[in-house]
């Protein structure tokens, strides 16, 4: 065998075949030697090949613990996913390693992951959050199996916690009408109407550029979203620096990049805003009132909450609606107006919906007709 391929030998006193390979380094800087054994030469050869696959995949140690493999898995993900996604991965794997970190990967059972999920809901996390964590755990163990590690048969099919009822509330159409009217009186208030009528995400509104709006054809193209990255974007990520920690990045999914027809009143409001707004070097439609920088989510939220107060709009418990609930409201209004679900999905940029997999794109005319119905509903 060549260097690094390992060696196979028979120990007569024990009646066993052994194989050994160099497997990385110890914390003290010494070479780690990994030894496997079997009663047969064929058996030890199989174990040696598996050990080599694990070593070449970067999995050091004969049977890595959940903590060891989890840390190595996160290092590999850092070059593959967005910084925001990586933060979510780190949180989920942190929960996993805190509870099961000392266990070897091969000793983890599906019931361990199910019990940990129940424990997470017990400390007040929403079912959706816990399901997200469990999904990441499943991804890690799937990769562990792909790397040649022994993953128990119960792990891939472990049961996630039950999905709870969505807590997002839709704003009643009468109150939406008051919000849209009040938004006309504040600088750039049309940004909230874009969310209430078109269902644009807050980051999509903040990342909207004038070049994305075609006033001749009356369409709006969702091309980028404005996000705050705490760490530099990884190689391969499309990210245009704006200012400070703010970047224009592509939508998370392919369906998020979409062209939406603009109903008449909304198109006119955007024309009016174009005449009033000061320009900026990035061509953004909306910018911060103070300093003229990119639209900050915290300050935008405060304006949104004040807008509700001025319009006399609030949830039944007196609390303000979340800005993301404006998007949920748009979908609800479209359905109330009789717009087909497949058309709603196309306008909203939903991904992976069953309706989208069955039907083709509904077409610009159907979308425009649906949005006109929404404008009529709240006028």
Image (cartoon, rainbow, N blue to C red):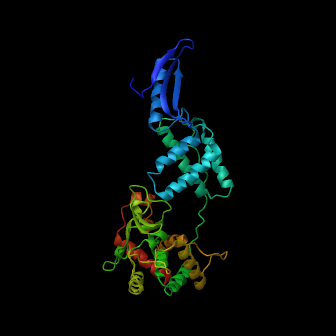
Q: Is residue 15 above or below residue 375?
A: above
Give percent across and percent down for residue 258.
Answer: 38, 67
Task: Indicate the position of residue 376 as horizontal and vertical percent values.
Answer: 46, 82
Is residue 298 at all visible to an observer of this figure? Answer: yes
Residue furthest top in the image: 12
Q: Quadrant of the N terminus?
A: top left
Left/right of residue 49 with respect to residue 129 in the rendered view:
left
Q: Nearer the viewer, residue 69 or 309?
A: 69
Toward which corner of the image does residue 349 lie, by quadrant? Answer: bottom left
Q: Residue 62 vs residue 279: left or right?
A: right
| Vertical relation: 215 (above or below) 202 | below
Q: Position of residue 37 (x, y in %)?
A: 53, 22
Using the image as rendered, state which of residue 320 and residue 72 is in the foreground.
Answer: 72
All told, the count of numbered labels is 0
Q: Position of residue 275 (x, y in %)?
A: 38, 86
Name the quadrant containing residue 13: top right
Observer-nearest of 204 and 316: 204
Question: Could you tell me which residue is drawn at 55 percent across and 44 percent down?
Answer: 70
**Outermost residue, left side:** 216
User: Extreme right residue here?
Assistant: 122
Answer whether residue 201 is visible to the viewer in this image: no
**Looking at the image, is 135 positioned above or below residue 187?**
above
């Amino acid at each position: 065998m060549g260097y690094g391929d390992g060696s196979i030998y028979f120990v007569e006193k024990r009646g066993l075949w052994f194989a050994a390979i160099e497997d990385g380094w110890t914390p003290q800087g010494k070479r780690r030697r990994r030894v496997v054994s079997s009663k047969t030469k064929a058996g030890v050869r199989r174990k040696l090949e598996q050990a080599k696959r694990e070593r070449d995949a970067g999995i050091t140690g004969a049977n890595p613990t959940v903590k060891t493999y989890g840390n190595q898995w996160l290092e590999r993900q850092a070059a593959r996913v967005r910084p925001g996604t990586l933060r979510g991965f780190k949180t989920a794997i942190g929960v996993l390693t805190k509870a099961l970190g000392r266990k070897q990967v091969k000793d983890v059972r599906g019931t361990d992951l199910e019990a940990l999920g129940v424990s997470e809901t017990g400390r007040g996390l929403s079912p959706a959050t816990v399901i997200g964590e469990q999904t990441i755990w499943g991804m890690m163990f799937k990769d562990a199996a792909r790397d040649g590690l022994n993953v128990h048969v119960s792990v891939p099919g472990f049961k996630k916690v039950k999905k709870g009822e969505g807590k997002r509330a839709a704003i009643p159409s009468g109150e939406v009408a008051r919000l849209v009217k009040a938004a006309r009186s504040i600088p750039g208030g049309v940004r909230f109407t874009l969310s209430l009528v078109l269902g644009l995400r807050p980051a999509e509104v903040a990342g909207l550029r004038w070049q994305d709006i075609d006033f001749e054809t009356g369409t709006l193209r969702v091309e980028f979203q404005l996000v705050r990255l705490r760490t530099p974007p990884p190689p391969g990520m499309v990210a245009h620096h704006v200012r400070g920690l703010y970047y224009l990045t592509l939508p998370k999914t392919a369906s998020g990049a979409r062209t939406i027809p603009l109903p008449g009143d909304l198109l006119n409001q955007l024309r009016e805003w174009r005449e009033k707004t000061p320009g900026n070097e990035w061509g953004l439609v909306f910018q911060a009132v103070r300093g003229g920088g990119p639209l900050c989510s915290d300050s935008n939220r405060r304006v949104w909450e004040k807008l509700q107060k001025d319009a006399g709009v609030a949830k039944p418990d007196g609390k303000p609606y979340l800005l993301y609930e404006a998007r949920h409201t748009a979908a609800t209004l479209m359905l109330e107006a009789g717009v087909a679900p497949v058309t709603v999905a196309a306008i909203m940029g939903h991904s992976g919906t069953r309706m989208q997999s069955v039907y083709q794109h509904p077409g610009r005319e159907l979308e425009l007709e649906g949005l006109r119905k929404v404008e009529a509903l709240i006028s």
